[in-house]
Amino acid sequence: MAVGGKRRWWWKRRAAVVAGVTIAVSVWVGSHCYFRRENMAKAEEALVSMCEERARMIQDQFAVSVNHVHALAILISTFYYQKQPPALDQETFAYYTAKTAFERPLLNGVAYAERIIHSQREIFETRQGWTIMTMKREPSPMQDEYAPVIYSQETVSYIEAIDMMSGEEDRENILRARATGKAVLTKPFRLLESNHLGVVLTFPVYRSGLPEDATVEQRVEATAGYLGGAFDVESLVENLLRQLAGNQDITINVYDITNASEPLIMYGPQIPEGYMPLSHVSMLDFGDPFRKHQMHCRYREKPPLPLSAITTPFGIFVIIMLGGYIVFAAKNHYDNVKEDCRKMEELKVQAEAADVAKSQFLATVSHEIRTPMNGVLGMLDMLLDTDLNLTQKDYAQTAQVCGKALISLINEVLDRAKIEAGKLEIEAVPFDLRSILDDVISLFSSKSREKGIELAVFVSDKVPEVVTGDPGRFRQIITNLVGNSVKFTERGHIFVQVHLADNSDLGADEKVHSGLNGLSRSEKVQIMSDCTFDTLSGFEAADTRNNWENFKLLLSDEMCLQEASTSDKEPDIVTLIVSVEDTGIGIPLRAQDRVFTPFMQADSSTSRNYGGTGIGLSITKCLVELMGGQINFISRPNVGSTFTFTAVFKRCNKDAIADTKRTLSEALPTGFKGMKAFIVDGKPVRNAVTRYHLKRLGIAVEVANTVKMMLNSLTRQNSNFRTGRQPYIILIEKDSWYTGMDVYLHNQLLMLKQNDCVLELPKVILLVTCEYDKMSSGSLVDTVIIKPLRASTVAACLQQVLGMEKQQKKELSNGPTNLRNLLAGKNILVVDDNKVNLRVAASALKKYGATVECAESGKDALSLLQLPHKFDACFMDVQMPEMDGFEATRQIRLMESKANEQISNGGASRGEDSMIVEWHLPILAMTADVIQATYEECLKCGMDGYVSKPFEEQQLFQAVAKFLVSKPSSDS
Amino acid sequence: MVGGILVFFTAVLAVKVRSRWRRSRCWRLKTVYIAFASDAFRDGFLDDQYTLLLQLQDENEPDFVLQVATLFFEDSEKLLNELRGILDKQDVDFEKLDACVRKLTGSSASIGAKRIKNTCIAFHNCCKEGRKELCLKCLQHLAQERLLMKSKLETLFKLEKQIRAAGASVPVLSK
């Protein structure tokens, strides 16, 4: 197919070439012919005009000569015949004619012959003194008439006395002339003497008195003589033509064609010569109607072909060939380009297919790897459960850790593949942002402690407690960023901040990458010289926006905004700006533009030193974009990097907030409300963070820069208000601490107490970043909190310090064991028409120690629920055939209210105080779809709560705890 | 990355080969069981509810899951027949259909059969829209899913039984 196509293409090309050349050649030939013909036409035209010109000229000259001969005839008749004696003699005639010869350029000479009748011959001969001679110069034989020449021009004097009638041509001429009275011509013949071709012109001279319309006889009668002249055509015409231009180019033949069958040549070469194909014939009229003359003109040579007739077609030919070549080359080029383009398309399709295949392969492979990996991990779990010696255990644990790392890596790859395939979807569930940040912080706490980095989180008060979004992905983003920061930071701090987008706009323009180098900022240099910065740890950060100046602005902004916005209608959408700032090695300038490219770390040495695949940031970017945000960073090598991203969440409505708060993971303990704390910290950013955590616990905060200032203000305050209702807590940063401080502080505080400034000794808590800092604290410190700070760790510490442990512990430990406590020994009825559900629910409840009875329909339930109740609670399916849960509950409630009325009526009589409690069986709805409407309907018909099917431990506990008074004291 | 995957593959192979060498039937059975179960979880046949069920199973009720499953399959067969009956009629009573579907949803959720549950939810939506042809498709799908689930669970139970017969404890599944 391809070969055939190629051959066909080749043939086509060949045909095109041949056609092109043919066209060019034919155009060349065509134009050449055209030029030739044009040239010929022009030559012919020129020939015609030249020929005509010559013909006219000869004719004119001839006519002039004839006219003059005519005049001579008149002269002779006037002076010879009408004068007595004649006034003309040979001498006069010769003189006159010689003088007037210029008038007759074509005539050799003229002569006059008198008409002599035979009878008059004697007289004439005697008068003249000579005898009449013939042409052959012999005395003339006897004739009827004679025409001897009596006068002649000197040039032709040799014909004197010759009888003109003796010559054949002359005789004929004479006869015709006197008959017509006009000039007549002989046919051409060789003239005497000159032997040139010539003709003889004869003109009759009449005696006077001849009328205009005389008959031939009258004319013959009146004839007196004949005037004749010889035209030496050859030489004369030669002379004449010589005067004209272009004489050399053409040859001329003059013919006498009186006898059409055999034209007699008058002038020109005997055999016609010159360029035969082109000739012109002009008629000549010499005034003799009997004789007809023609003039043939032709070029002596073939007219030369002009150069343009060759060059122009050749030029056209060249142009056409060039044009053809250009078209050909263009077509060739076009074909090539098209072919290339097609190949490119093919390759592109292949590449795209390969890309898709790669993604699919990645997804599949990672999926496939996960399965056996789970097996491996499961096995390792089991292995760890068995009796192992320490070394074996260590090996197994290492293997497990590695396996887990591998799984997380595979998950990342899978994520990436999923994102690329567009399969990742973002959830929208309510979640508590702060607790997620706390979780992330705690995840990295051990690492940061190990390295001695400060890890801190700060969430602006403006950020709502609960927002709707994808907590998992949000956590993933933060984890990725913080994980990177932790990995690349050896000193200083990592600081995560969350603000509302609208009030952290300041310096937003600075986000542009161009400012990255930071070289342009002159003030930076100035700050550098100070060596400490207003950042969390005092190290310089890449993004100046995070220093105290801006931070303060943000905070103050928040304060006033908060007051103003409480009444405002809050928008549905919450856009958060999250920044993760570190003081690590930073990103090399040349690598900054490909940070978000998958599998790209700053450079290969980085991955050697720090490990990792470099996929994290690209996933992070994708996730941020999926959440409707943008990610950006500012980084300076050896100073640090700040990653900033925005994320769009939805605000939750109030009910949902309450709802989620209930279900979300452990809420913070609330026992600290109204307490007061003092923070001693020289660094404003850091104390803002500490303050944020304490505030979340509901603790009022005061700040002092140094211990001394703190003591001063303590003294001052307490002398003013002697309140002291709550114990003071003093949190002191490590920076403001030195050895021996504890004793000093203790003494000072004791003094304050003695002075009644404080009722109780304040608790002193030291905040440190590293494990070994703990050692330097003195014995008189109540406790030490190792950073990173988290609300829950702070809470736990405070509880420990303040002795609130026991009270809190109870509240905190409401897990499944509590559920067991609640349900143990209870009689519970489960109603569900679905056997499977029934079985499962019953089994689950049994597991918590309850005694369970089952009913498969509303009616069965009713019959079992006769008063007095033997059950402590009833779980009722909402949707059942015949009688649904709502209806059954209504009937039970009806029954109960009747019984209650009876009791209230006759209760007094019975007097059993233990039974005075009203009948009210707690009924819980079981439903698969937890919609608000269902919940409301449940309450309407008298149910006490609802649980979703299948049971969730937490929810079950919450529902049950409301009405089942745990009787742990009695039961356990 | 690729190197990691390769290394990992070889590691898995080595583990497999080693386990075979040990010729410990029990060990292999457990491996198969875990692999099979995690497969089922991964493919969405089972969800957390099933692990909860497994936790509910104790000495008092050693066959609890088996019983529940048997119950479920009997129940679901009945329900499927009922659904078929309703859909066979000329005018379909969608409310009745929906009630049936709901029941099946509930029981499949209880047993942790995630895919059946999801199919039921789709079925429910079809019922709401009242489109018979879609309902029929869903029914077909449902029957198929049920059979799949049945074979999965049967295999699992068989494995469990074998493990128990070999005198070992069934490994605890957790997602």
Image (spheres, grey):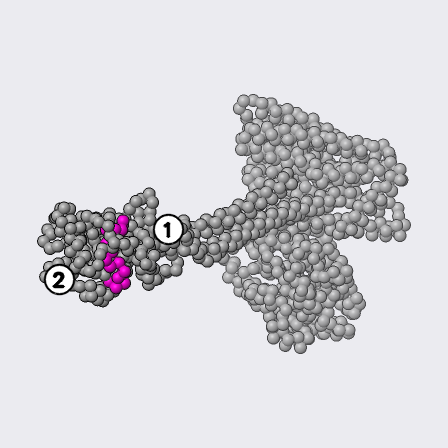
The question of residue A164 being in magenta is answered with: yes
Q: Residues within 10 Å of mark 1 (few under 14, many from 20)?
A: some
Residue A22 place in picture, x, y as percent = 52, 46
Which is closer to the viewer, label 2 or label 1? 2
Residue linked to disc 2: A86
> Which quadrant of the figure contains the N terminus of chain A?
top right
Residue linked to disc 1: A279
Instruction: Please say if A129 is above or below A179.
Output: below
Q: Nearer the viewer, residue A273 or A707?
A: A273
> Which one is earlier in the sequence, the residue at label 2 or at label 1?
2
- Residue at image position (56%, 44%) is A15
Residue type marked 1: Ser
SS for callout 2: loop
Q: Splitting the image into 4 quarters, where does residue A943 fall?
A: top right
- Residue at image position (10%, 51%) is A211
The question of residue A964 being in magenta is answered with: no
Tell me the chain of label 2. Answer: A
Residue type marked 2: Pro
Q: Nearer the viewer, residue A688 or A754?
A: A688
Task: Report if the CB atoms under discs 2 and 1 are less than 8 Å apart.
Answer: no
Residue A860 place in picture, x, y as percent = 64, 27
Q: Residues within 10 Å of mark 2 (few under 14, many from 20)?
A: few
Note whether residue A874 is visible.
Answer: no
Q: What range of the chain is rendered magenta?
A: A153-170
Q: What's the distance in space between the residues labelled 2 and 1, CA to CA?
A: 53 Å
Residue A720 place in picture, x, y as percent = 61, 72
Give the label on residue A532, or none. none
SS for callout 1: strand
